[in-house]
Each structure stands twice: as C-alpha cells, then as structure tokens.
Amino acid sequence: MEILIYGTVNSFKLILIAFGFTLVYGVSRLPNFAHGAIFVFTGFIAWIMMHKLNLPLLPAALLSLAGAALVGVLIYQVILKRIRGMNMNEIIATYAIGVAMIETFRWLGFKGTTFTLPVLFEGMLFIGDVPIDYQRLMVVTVGLVMLVAVWIFTKFTRTGLALRGIAQDERAAMMLGIDSDMTATLAMALGSAMSGLAALMIFPLGSIVVEAGYNTLIFALAVCMVGGIGSWGGTVLAAFVLGFLQVITVTYLATHFQMVVTLGAIIATLIIKPSGFFGKHKELEERV
Amino acid sequence: MKTGMRKERIDRGIKVRSDSIYALSSWREISYLMAPRALLVGGFLLAPLILYFFPYWQKVLLIVCIYALLSMAFDFLANYVGLVCLGGSFFVGVGGYGAALLNKYLHFSPFLSIPVAALGGAAFCTFFLLPCLPLRGVYFAIITLMYPLMMTRIIEAFELFGGTNGMMDISGFANPWVEQYFLIISTLVFLFALRRLAVEDIGLVIKGIKDNDQSVRASGINITVVKAQALFYASFLGCFAGAYLAHTYMWAGLSMFALDFSIIPIAATVVGGGGSLLGAVVGAILLVPLSEALRAFGPLRIVSYSLILTVVIVIKGEGLLNYLSRKYSQFERWVEI
Amino acid sequence: MLTVRNLSKNFGGVTALNDINFAISKGEILGVIGPNGSGKTTLINCITGFIKASAGEIVFNGRNIKGMQPHNIVNLGICRTFQIMRPYSSMPAYKNLIIPLYGPRARKTGGWRGGGRHGDRNIIALDLLEEVGFERESKVPYKLAGTLPTGYLKRLELARCLALNPDLLICDEVFSGLSMSEIASMVPLIEKLNKSGVTIIMIEHRLKELFKVAKRVMAISYGDKIIEGLPAEVMANEKVKEAYLGADEGV
C-alpha cells in the first residue's frame, strides 16, 4: 500500500520533471540540456522573491514561472536559433549554459540545505494507514492537471495544433504557413515553465540544492529515453515504471541505489530498444 | 561598398608547392611545412625547462597534457568516428582506478602500471560501451554521460576500492623530470600516431563511418568492429591520462569520474577547432592555464568556462586552429562578381 | 544462384512486400520494374540485409541469407548500389573507393584487379574510376565526392560495387537522373560487366534503356509480384499497364 501511494507520487514527480523536456524535443527536435538548470533557477528565483523581496507565495510562484519561460525563450533566441540543426552543438551549448546557470547559483552562495520553499497547504491525511501530506497530493493533482491541460491545448487550440503539426512533419507544416521558429520559441517557453512548475511543486518537499539541477536533468533524460524520446504517451508510462522502480529500490535496498537503478534503466533501454517504448518506427527511414 | 563583391579564398603559392613532393627542393618550403609542427614539439619539450623557476606552472603543464590527451580522444570520437562522447571522465576513472589497483595489490611500478592500466582500461571501457555503439547522435551522447555517474554511484553504494575516500598511498614518480617528460613525450607520440592513423586506410574507413555508415556496410565492412576499434584507441588515451593522474597525485578516487574531465576536453576541442586533433591540443593549451588563473574564483571557474564554450559555439563554430590554418595557407581578397 | 521464396515485409501495419517469389541464375540480367512506392527498394533492402524481412526465404548459392548482417551478405558476393547515392562527401572521389578495397571481401577475392591484396590502392582506385567513366586526366577524380553532380555519383556507386568483385550486382535505379548520353555510356559498361560473369538485378524506371540490357523482367505493384517474363510479354500485361497508367495519372 505504501509502495503504491508513494510510487504514484514519485511517478508524478517524474512526469512533472520530464514532460517539459519531452515536449520541447517532440515539437522542435531540440535537446534542451539546460532543463535541470531551469528547474533549479525557478526554485531559487521563487526563494529570492519571497525572502528578499518579501512577496507572498502565489505572486512569487507566478513570477518565477514567467522567469523560467523567459529563460527558455532567451536560450532559444540567443543560442539555439543560430546553431539549430547541428545536433552536437545543440547538446553542448545547452548543457554548457545549464552548467553555467547552476554553477552561478553555487558561486552566489546558494549551497547547503538552508533554502526552502513553503508548501501551499500544511497538513496531511491518511489513506488507509499510510500518512501522506497535502503537498505530495498536490504533486499528483498538478501533474494530472498539467497532462489534461496539455492534451486539451494540443487537441483543441490553434496554437496547440500548430505545435503538433510541426512535431509530426516540420517541412509540411512550414509549407502550410506554420512558423518553425515561432513554435520552437513557444515550445521552449512552455517546456521551461513546466520545468519551473515541477520545481515549485517538488522543492517544498525538501530543500533547494544546486545538485538538484544535475539530478533533474538525469531523471528527465531517463524518463524520456525509456519512454521514447519525444513520445508523450511513452513519457507518462516510463515515468510510472521508473517511479515505482525507484520507490521499490529505496524500500528494499537503500537510497544509494536509486540513481543506480535509474541509470541502469536508461542503459538497458538504450541497448535493448534504442527508440524506447513508443519511439518512432526506425525502419521507415530507409524506405523512400 | 561591398555590393557586387565577394570574398575569395586562394591557397598561397607556397602551400600549393609544398603540397606536392617538390617541397623537398627548398628550405623555405620545408620550413613552411615544418614550422607549425616544430613550434608545437619544441614548445612542449622546452616548456619544463622554461618553467623551471615556476614549479606551480610546471604542474599546470602536466594538466595541460592530461587534458590534451582527453581532448584528442573526444575530437577523434566526435569528428572522425561521429560519436559524441560526453563521458570522458569514464575513461579517466577507469584508468586511474586500474593503475591504483595494479600498483597497490600487484606492486607494479608506474612505468608498468600506466601502460597496463591504459590497455586494460581501454579494453574494459570498450567492452562496456560496446552495446551502445549502434546508437547515434543524442542517444550516444546521453548514454556516455551516464556511465561515469553510474560508476560513481556504484562505487559509493558498494563502498568499493575505499568508497568515498578513494585509494591512497599509490607510489609516485621518483624524479620530477622523468615525471614531466614521460607525459609530454607520450602526449606528442600519441598525437602524431593518431594523426597518422587518420590518413591511413583504416582511418579512411573510420571517417567513412561518420560520412555514411550505410555505405561502409555496403562495402562489406562490419561497422561495429571498426567503431569498437576506434573507441579502443580513444579510451586508451583517456585511461592513460587517468592512470598517470593516479600516480602523480598518488591517489585514486571518485573525483576522477568528475564532470571536469568530460566537459573541459569538449570545450578545448570546440575552442581549438575539431577535426584535426591538433586543434584539440591547442584548445587544451589555451584553456587549462586560463582555468588555473580562474581557480581563485571557485565555482565561477566552471561558469566562465561554460560561457566561453557557449559563445565560441555560437559565434565561431569552426574553432581557433581551423581559422589560423586557413590564414596560414590561404589569402583572401575581394573580387567583383 | 539467388532464389527468393514467399518474401514478405510489413512496416507496422503496412505491407510493403507480399509473398514475392523469384529466382535468378548465374550470368543473367533480371530487370525489376514497378511504379513509385511499389516496394522495389524494400525488396533490395531485404535481400541485402539492410532491412529484416518479416517472412520468407532468401537463398544465395544454397545458403539462406535471410537475417544475416549486411556486411556478411556483401562478403558472400552480393553488392548493391543505393538509389539515393551515399558517397563519402568529405573525401575526394577516388578515396571513396579505398574503403571497399580495404574491406574483407576485396582482400579475400582480390577485389577489382587484385587491388584488395597488393599494389597501391590509390592508383587502383583511379583506374577503377576511369573504367566507370571518370576522366582520368581531369580534376574530377580528385574532387570532393560531395561536390560531384548526379551522373558521377551514380558511377561512383557502381564503382564501389565493382571494387568488391561482386558475384551478384543489384543496381537500384542507376539510370534515373541521368541524361540520354550518360545512359548511353552506362549501358555498354553494364553489358561488359555481365559478359565478365557478373549476375545483375536492375531496378529501373527507364524501361526503354532497361529492355536493352535485361532479357527477363519482373513487375511489382503495391508489394505484389504481377508478372515475370520477356519484356514484351510484361509490357503487354493488363495489370502492368494499369499500374503504370494509374501512376501516370497521379503525376
């Protein structure tokens, strides 16, 4: 029972973390390796707003989300736009800018465990005999809401449809007058905001540490790789598989092994089926 | 006004002449060909003597060589084989721990344990990366990023080889001159050997895989075997660097799997210019002293590093050495269209 | 020499090849025709191992080669060209041929004029390029392959196969994209090859030119084999006409 509940919570954590990454990759084929950095960035910005500028939680949260989206847009407009299509340079550049962001916070003195974000609702309840606090329930709720929102957005709005069009066939979509730069910017903004949202939901459970930037990137990559990079359904499924796997590892082995299991899962998936659970059919590439 | 004009690049006369065998006919042409090489080799060989009065910078020189080796490994994999390897520290760690184990338990001297650890480590790395070889682009980059992290966690979790403390009391080099020249000469030998390899027939096959792997398969060549071979060479360089580090620090530990060994070589290759191996070395010569100078700033070092890297990628994708070599062998002029 | 039995291939739910049967004996030239998207290239990819066939048997010289790796199939003697040319763009044209000359097939059989075993591979590569119609004295063989026009790239594809000393050569549309005079110079080359003992399967759109060299033709449409026989018989077939006319209407 405990595993079931905490597994679910953990899975939704992973969904929150990974969905932004998979959205950007799915739409624009851009590997945003600064994803983890944006995660930490949002956390710290929210903290600064609350503790230095004395803003209440909600405005601080909204402003930091906007900040995250802005960073995403800037990364695209200033860096990625110029090197788009060069796979290796995209990875190196986003990774480097991510490292720069994370290490800047470390340099500014944001280290240790003194930085925390407050939870939205205090308290806890019992499901059966398992205690669960409201914030963890919030993670699940927000995760669900985000999934539904994305689904509605991409199914029923013009912009959302344009995003899906670009994701399916960039050239065809461009011929129909969808601006690839515009959608990529939008995707980066959305993806970064999602990463920020994940940060606002997850950081209250512990404290804000710079190392979370690297770990988040790895978790996001793990989920996306296992699920099939760019595949939304695969991401959700993979998040559940990994989420439960991690909780089971922690319960029966030790916390140390959590990362080992995650990394092992990526390596195993890549070796057995590189395109992940729901990756696109590879053989079709060869056909003309 | 530049309207109706375009820039034209033409090979310098001396470059054209010295490309063919007639280079041997004049000292001027021979020196044109040899000058850059002589500068590099001479510079490396003389550096320890020049830096004699600055022992700190002698140490920096060693680190330059270590990173030069790693950058060569990255450049070779990325620009010759087409595998972007973000896990240079995997090689360093495996080589370092290998040498430490050989030294501690089998009492190998550094001159035996370094080559043995390099060879054995290269075999180990190649074996474990073998399943990833069919992967391309992003996938290979991500998985290689995972390997060193995985090693760190495994060593931590099982408390292997001294766990988080690492292995201490590894024997060092008796003589500082031997210590320095051993590494410098090895680096130069590996550089020229690898450059030579690249123009041999097997080098063409390796480059062919990057250009068009399907075509290589259609030529009846098993690309996995060739890639594994190339990976072995690259990981040999990385493990060599790691094994040397273990002996010069007299310690092997988790920080050998640290991010620095993966990122700085990439930065060096990008800054120096990929595709020639020499560019990677030049990048290391530029960046490592810079990073030492920035050491006082702590974490800011990595920040400035990453920023330099990003800026160079965005603004001057071709790298410094490619730019310089173009200036060296070609001149430009404006012509009317 | 090569027998294909009940060969099928599905991509996801799409049937690209459905129960294909045919055989080719030594020294023959077999033409394969069919409209765009009929599965011709998939057929080649299945035979040469670049794609795994879903069902059926491919027997070459008494050995089932289905499921083997492409390089192993090449080393048995089946060589192919690519319809979309795959040169090593960053190398000079003649260096492109060093790679096949270096491979195990050329080493075992000697490759083209023994170039795989002895002699200077660079010179043999230049000889081979001259054989397929590169002007030896010009700069063309030394140009980067990525800068060559289609005509030369098609010849380069062919040269890559010749370097391997093939027993069975599969040409995937070597005539398409070429001018009439270029084709006219390719036809004798293929005939010469065939006379020297190479069995050839030719996939072609240019029917007139194909019929000059191929004595037997097989037609495919939507993954099904329609008919096999003499060129005249095949062209007289109602279904073939329909397939081609249908395709023409779409153009």
Image (cartoon, helix red, strand yellow):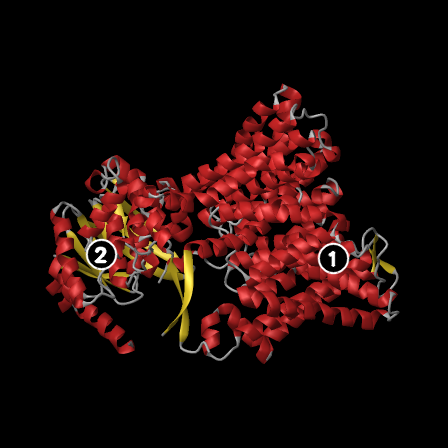
In the image, taking residue B184 as reference, residue C202 lies left or right, namely left
Compared with residue A18, is residue C121 higher up or lower down, i.e. above or below? above
Q: Amino acid at mark 2?
A: Ser
Separation of marks 2 and 1 at Cα, in angstroms:
58 Å
Q: Quadrant of the C terminus of chain A?
A: bottom left
Q: Which image quadrant is residue C121 in?
A: top left
Compared with residue A27, is residue C193 higher up or lower down, i.e. above or below? above
Q: Nearer the viewer, residue A133 or B261?
A: B261
Q: Kindly give the residue lying farthest to the front in the view shown.
A: B27
Compared with residue A238, is residue B189 higher up or lower down, i.e. above or below? above
Q: Residues within 10 Å of mark 2 (few under 14, many from 20)?
A: few
Q: Marks 2 and 1: which is nearer the front? A: 2
User: Residue B169 in the image: x percent, y percent?
Assistant: 72, 25
Chain containing the residue with disc 1: A
Q: How many marks?
A: 2
User: Residue A111 in the image: x percent, y percent?
Assistant: 81, 52
Q: Which residue is mark 2?
A: C138
One can see residue A26 in this view? yes
Q: Nearer the viewer, residue C245 or B198?
A: B198
User: Residue C19 in the image: x percent, y percent?
Assistant: 29, 55
Chain containing the residue with disc 2: C
Q: Kindly give the residue lying farthest to the top in the view shown.
A: B107
Q: Which structural element holds mark 2?
A: loop
One can see residue C49 in this view? no
Q: Which image quadrant is residue C66 in?
A: top left
Q: Which residue is mark 1?
A: A104
Compared with residue A237, is residue A153 higher up or lower down, i.e. above or below? below
Q: Nearer the viewer, residue A266 or B153?
A: B153
Q: Which image quadrant is residue C204 in?
A: bottom left
